Amino acid sequence: MLTTRIYQWGVQQLMNPDLPGSDVFTASYFSEANLETIKSLLDCEADDLVMELYNLLVRPDENFELRWHRDDIPPTATAEEELARLSKPAYHAQWNLALYPDSSLILIPGSHRRPLTDVERAADPYEANIPGQIHVKLEAGEMAFYNNNIFHRGAYRSDVERMTLHGSMGHVAGGSLRARNVLQHGRDWIDLVDLSRVEDRQTAEGMRNRLVRLASEHEEVGYTHND
């Protein structure tokens, strides 16, 4: 039974073994280039890394937009609550790897280091133009890493082909902060991930096992956003 979730915007849980070809996606997730880049970004060793999310973002059948948001801070958060979360280490690296040219990601540079401004806080959730925003323009094969608590949204066009791999890896020190980000999307398949095509099997097994342990320690994680 296929338990991988398919939405208008893409396919979730690419490493779920219920998905045909999941071993290919899993091998790309654990590639040497990925691991080395993320170890550098997080200033850590392989034994600190935790397996997290891997999705495929695609062209929708109809134009589709995501609201302005931070992935792990609800829109109801006060400036003080935002700052309390943003002052902690990110404990993750998140990326978009474009297989076709992609400029769907819109964000406000530097907003992951500060509370929202009054203008940002008062803006319509789908505001098309907030001061300082940029479109992250990727050519095929280009990859962008970003903090998932940067203020961002997505605008996806039905007339522009899109396939973008969207993933994240965590740091073991993230604990409950990362548990909510990752485990709210499902957990039953994690220990069944097929690592047969992964080059560095030992590192991948360690990362998977750390996520399994995180899941066992956090049975109820809730949701950051209700929609």
Image (cartoon, helix red, strand yellow):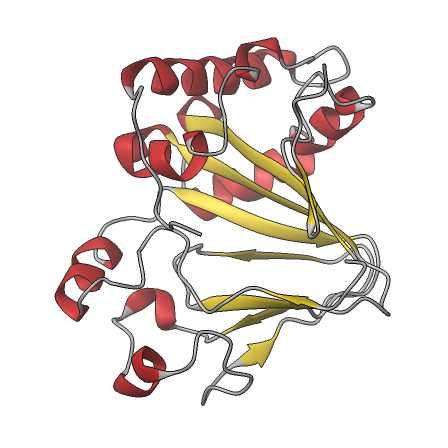
Percent position (x, y) of residue 218? 29, 21
Total marks shown come to: 0
Residue 213 found in image quarter: top left
In the foreground, 185 or 198: 185
Q: Quadrant of the N terminus?
A: top right
In the foreground, 71 or 51: 71
29 relative to 124, above or below:
above
Relative to 211, is 114 on the left or the right? left
Residue located at (35% from left, 20% from top): 214
Percent position (x, y) of residue 106? 57, 72
Work out which residue is located at the far left of the displayed protein and give it.
80
Relative to 216, is 8 on the left or the right? right
Residue 221 found in image quarter: top left
57 relative to 176, above or below:
below
Percent position (x, y) of residue 97? 70, 51
Relative to 192, is 42 on the left or the right? left
Relative to 61, is 166 on the left or the right? left
17 relative to 37, above or below:
above
Residue located at (38% from left, 58% from top): 149
Percent position (x, y) of residue 190? 54, 17
| Residue 45 can be seen in this image | no
| Residue 124 can be seen in this image | yes
57 relative to 3, above or below:
below
